C-alpha cells in the first residue's frame, strides 16, 4: 500500500515523486510505501495552512469543538484497525497500541469541551467605569514534529489543543511510523475538518524538519523527540514560540516498607512496557538496602519470564525495538555498563524470534552507581539499572542528580515518607505506589532540566503554547482616564 502526503485537503505525491518504505520491526516485512515530501512541499503545506487560517480562526470555538468531537467518535470506530497498523509499524504489543489510540480519543473529547471554555479571566481595574479582561488568541501556523514511539497519542497532545485554539497545522511525523500518522490524518478528513487546517508531510532524514522549522510562515514549533534534535531546533527557531519535550532518565525509589508484590509488578511494567521505548520508562531503580536482595531476586525471575515476540500475538509480553540501529545502540550500552563495573542479572543481549526482528532481551543491570553512563544517559530500550541506597534522602539526591527531570516514583507505605518524596523530587511528574509510565490527559505532562524548555502538554496547560494572551480594557467613563500616572492624586482632586 502507498500512503500520500496530505496538503490543502488533498492526498498528494511528494514534489520529487519519490517514496520510502516502512517496515515491521518484529518481522522485517514491508508495511507500506510512503510518498517522500521535499522542501517544496513544505512551502505548499505552509501556504495551505496560511490560506485556511483566517476562516478557521473565525470559526466559533464551539463549532471547532464539534469537529473534534466527530474526530473522537471516528477514532473510536477505527480504534482496532489503527492499533493493528500501529503495532505492525512500530512494534508495541497490541494492548499498548489500543491504549495509544485511546489516549487520542480521550484528548479529542477533552479538547472538544474546551471549545465552550478556552478560559480567560477578568480582574478588578484601577479606575472607575472601566472593565478589564484577558482572553486567549490563536497564533497562526504551527509546525508539529513528533516521534515514532507513540505515533497517535503524542501527536494528539499537540493537534487537538492547537486546533481548538484556532490555529492551523503542518505536521511532520517520524519516518519510522508514517503510515500510522497518515491513517490518523484521514480520520480528520472524514470528520469534516476544513481543507488546509491540518497538513501532513513525511520523509526520512533531517532536511524536511529543518525546512519546516526555518520556514518564515511558521509561528509555533512543538517538538517531541531526542534532546540533541530538540536543542538544534531551539537554536534554529529563534524568534518563534517553541515547545520541546525531550529525554528522560526516570527513577523508581523503593523503600524497605514498600508493598513488595505491587512494586515488582509496577517496576517490570515501567521498565519493559513499550520495550522501554518511552520517555517515561523507568530506567533507574533506586532501592533501599534492606529490601534490595529480595527485590532483585524477584525482578530477575520476572524479567527472564517475559516473552518476546510479534506484538500482534497476545501471548507475547514485549515487542521489538524500532530498528537494527536501536538494537545495536542498546547492546553498546550493555557493554559500557559492564566496563563500568555493572553486572547483568537478566537479559543483556540482542535477540530474534524465528530468526527475524529487532528484539532485545529485557535487561537488569546490578551494581550501578551514581555517575555511571548507564545511570545518566538515556538508553531508550529495555534496560533497568539498579542502585542501592541507605534511605530516602540518598535516593532523592540520586534521582534529582539526573540531567533529565520527567517522571519519578516512590514505593512506601509510610505517608510521611511519601509526602517528603512528593515535596523533594524535582521532576515534572511524581507517582506514589505506581510506576513511572502512564499519564492522564487532564493533567500537565512534561519535565524539568534537560527534559524540556518549561512548556507542558495536555490538560489546561496544553493550550499555553498554542495561544497568546490578549489583555482588553474597556473604558466607559466618557472621559480620558490616564493610566500609569499618579491616579490617586487625580481621583482625590475630582472628589
Image: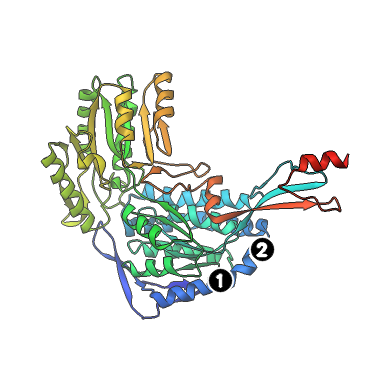
Question: Which is more N-terminal, label 1 or label 2?
Answer: 1
Residue 350: x, y in percent? 16, 50
Quadrant (top left/top right/bottom left/bottom right) for the C terminus? top right
The residue furthest right is 495
State left or right for residue 4 relative to residue 115: left
Instruction: Estimate how packed mark 1 is, as few (under 14), some (14 to 19) or many (20 or more) residues with alpha carbons within 10 Å.
Output: many
Residue 16 image-quadrant placement: bottom left
Q: Which residue does the image show at 38% across and 65% down from the upper left?
A: 179
449 sits to left or right of 122: left
Near-viewer residue (296 or 58): 58
**In this view of the protein, which residue sits in the foreground, 166 or 74?**
166
Q: Is residue 294 above or below residue 38?
A: above
Q: Residue furthest bottom?
A: 16
Residue at 35% of width from left, 53% of height from top?
149
Q: CA distance from mark 2 to mark 1?
A: 15 Å
Relative vertical location of residue 198 with respect to residue 222 in this rendering, above or below: below
Residue 405 drawn at (x, y percent): 37, 40
Q: Report helix, strand or loop for mark 2.
A: loop
Up-down: is 42 above or below 154?
below
Residue 468: quadrant of the picture: bottom right
* Model colouring: rainbow
The residue at which mark 1 appears reads as: 50
Nearer-the-camera pick, 391 or 61: 391
Residue 59 got which mark? 2
Quadrant of the rendering where the N terminus is positioned: bottom left
Please indicate whether residue 71 sits to the left or right of residue 322 in the image: right
Residue 211 in picture, x, y percent from top left: 40, 70
Amino acid at each position: 500500500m502507498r500512503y500520500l502526503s496530505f496538503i490543502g485537503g488533498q492526498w498528494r505525491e511528494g514534489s520529487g515523486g519519490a517514496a520510502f518504505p516502512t517496515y515491521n520491526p518484529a518481522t522485517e516485512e514491508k508495511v507500506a510505501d510512503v510518498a517522500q515530501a521535499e522542501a517544496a512541499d513544505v512551502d505548499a503545506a505552509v501556504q495551505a495552512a496560511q490560506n485556511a487560517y483566517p476562516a478557521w480562526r473565525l470559526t466559533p470555538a464551539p463549532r471547532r469543538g464539534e469537529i473534534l468531537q466527530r474526530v473522537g467518535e471516528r477514532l473510536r470506530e477505527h480504534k482496532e484497525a489503527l492499533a493493528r497498523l500501529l503495532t505492525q509499524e512500530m512494534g508495541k504489543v497490541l494492548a499498548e497500541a489500543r491504549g495509544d489510540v485511546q489516549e487520542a480519543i480521550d484528548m479529542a473529547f477533552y479538547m472538544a469541551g474546551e471549545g465552550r471554555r478556552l478560559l480567560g479571566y477578568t480582574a478588578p481595574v484601577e479606575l472607575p467605569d472601566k472593565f478589564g479582561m484577558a482572553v486567549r488568541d490563536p497564533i497562526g501556523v504551527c509546525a508539529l514534529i513528533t516521534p515514532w514511539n507513540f505515533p497517535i497519542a503524542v501527536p494528539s497532545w499537540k493537534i487537538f489543543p492547537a486546533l481548538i485554539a484556532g490555529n492551523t497545522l503542518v505536521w511532520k511525523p517520524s519516518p519510522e511510523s508514517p503510515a500510522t500518522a497518515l491513517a490518523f490524518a484521514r480520520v480528520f478528513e472524514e470528520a469534516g475538518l476544513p481543507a488546509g487546517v491540518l497538513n501532513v508531510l513525511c520523509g526520512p532524514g533531517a532536511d524536511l524538519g529543518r525546512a519546516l522549522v526555518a520556514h518564515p510562515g511558521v509561528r509555533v514549533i512543538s517538538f517531541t523527540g531526542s534532546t540533541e534534535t530538540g536543542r538544534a531546533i531551539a537554536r534554529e527557531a529563534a524568534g518563534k514560540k517553541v515547545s520541546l519535550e525531550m529525554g528522560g532518565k526516570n527513577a523508581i525509589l523503593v523503600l524497605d516498607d514498600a508493598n513488595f508484590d505491587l512494586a515488582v509488578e509496577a517496576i517490570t511494567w515501567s521498565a519493559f512496557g513499550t520495550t522501554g521505548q518511552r520517555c517515561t520508562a523507568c530506567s533507574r531503580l533506586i532501592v533501599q538496602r534492606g529490601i534490595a536482595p529480595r527485590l532483585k531476586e524477584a525482578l530477575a525471575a520476572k524479567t527472564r519470564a517475559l516473552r518476546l515476540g510479534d506484538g500482534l500475538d497476545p501471548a507475547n509480553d514485549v515487542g521489538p525495538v524500532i530498528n537494527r540501529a536501536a538494537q545495536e545502540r542498546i547492546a553498546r550500552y550493555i557493554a559500557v555498563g559492564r566496563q563500568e563495573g555493572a553486572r547483568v542479572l537478566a537479559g543483556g543481549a540482542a535477540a530474534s524470534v524465528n530468526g527475524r526482528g529487532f528484539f532485545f532481551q529485557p535487561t537488569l543491570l546490578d551494581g550501578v552507581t551514581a555517575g555511571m553512563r548507564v545511570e545518566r544517559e538515556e538508553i531508550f530500550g529495555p534496560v533497568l539499572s539498579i542502585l542501592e541506597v541507605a534511605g530516602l534522602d540518598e535516593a532523592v539526591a540520586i534521582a534529582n542528580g539526573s540531567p533529565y527531570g520527567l517522571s519519578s516514583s516512590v514505593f512506601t507505605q509510610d505517608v510521611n515518607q511519601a509526602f517528603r518524596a512528593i515535596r523533594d523530587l524535582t521532576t515534572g511528574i511524581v507517582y506514589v505506589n505506581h510506576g513511572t509510565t502512564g499519564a492522564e490527559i487532564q493533567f500537565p505532562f512534561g519535565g524539568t532540566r534537560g527534559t524540556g524548555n518549561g512548556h507542558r502538554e495536555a490538560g489546561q496547560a496544553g493550550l499555553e503554547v498554542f495561544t497568546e494572551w490578549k489583555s482588553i480594557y474597556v473604558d466607559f467613563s466618557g472621559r480620558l482616564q490616564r493610566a500609569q500616572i499618579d491616579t490617586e492624586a487625580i481621583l482625590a482632586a475630582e472628589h
